[in-house]
Amino acid sequence: MSDIEELSKAGARWYVAHTYSGYENKVKTNIEKIVENRGLGDLIFDVRVPVEITKEVDENGVEKEVETKLFPCYVLIKMIMNDESWHVVRNISGVTGFVGPGSKPVPLTAAEAKALCVDVRETKRTFAIGDLVEIVEGVFKGYSGKIGDISAETDEVTVIVPTVGRDMPIRLETRFIRKKED
């Protein structure tokens, strides 16, 4: 199984595409056009070029709003990474590649997406400390334990998993666990 196919199992995540300088808005527009024309709305959900709007006064004393790119040469894309979506973005004129080692794109973590203000959403707390949960994804898939801690800042919990000899705390995003049926 390829690295790209592995990433598709994670669902929609934010990825960062590197572009030529000054091509950020053109890349964003081209991706949006291709998504519309090819009906790829189920793979590529959002494209953003983060900007900051500041007020500057010119030499004549006139105040004007100036838009400054927060991350020049980068475009943020919320997408399900598979071969098709990878090729669509990678082959857009002005895109040099995805951020990540070699040709393997690396999605932003929930904390990084939140820090960049691209994936701010209110999450309902469906878990409480002491809840019995099962790990459904990742290296510890199939293990069960109790929630020992819930992070207020991130969408993460610490699951205390009993092992031979001692309890082992495992830090996970809530999407990797589900409540265990009694």
Image (cartoon, rainbow, N blue to C red):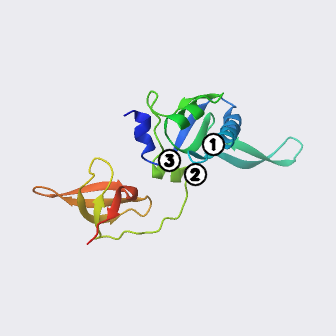
In this image, 126 relative to 121: left or right?
left
Q: Is residue 166 above or below residue 181?
A: above
Q: Is residue 126 above or below residue 53?
A: below
Q: Of the residues under marks 3 and 1, which one precedes in the sequence?
A: 3
Q: Residues within 10 Å of mark 1 (few under 14, many from 20)?
A: few
Q: Of the residues under marks 3 and 2, which one precedes in the sequence?
A: 3
Residue 98 locus on image (x, y percent)? 52, 33
Mark 3–mark 2 distance (CA, rounded to whole Å) = 11 Å
In this image, 67 relative to 49: left or right?
right
Q: Which mark is residue 70?
A: 1
Mark 2–mark 1 distance (CA, rounded to whole Å) = 13 Å
Quadrant of res 174: bottom left
Q: Of the residues under marks 2 and 1, which one precedes in the sequence?
A: 1
Q: Quadrant of the N terminus?
A: top left
Q: Which residue is mark 2?
A: 118
Mark 3–mark 1 distance (CA, rounded to whole Å) = 20 Å
Extreme-left residue of the structure = 165
Q: Quadrant of the C terminus?
A: bottom left
Q: Nearer the viewer, mark 2 or mark 1?
A: 2
Mark 2 is on which residue type? Answer: Val
Residue 119 locus on image (x, y percent)? 55, 54
Q: Residue at x 48, y 45 (%)?
A: 108
Q: Residue at x 63, y 30 (%)?
A: 92
Mark 1 is on which residue type? Answer: Leu
Question: Tags 3 and 1 in contact by the CB under 8 Å rule?
Answer: no
Q: Which residue is mark 3?
A: 13
Q: Residues within 10 Å of mark 3 (few under 14, many from 20)?
A: many
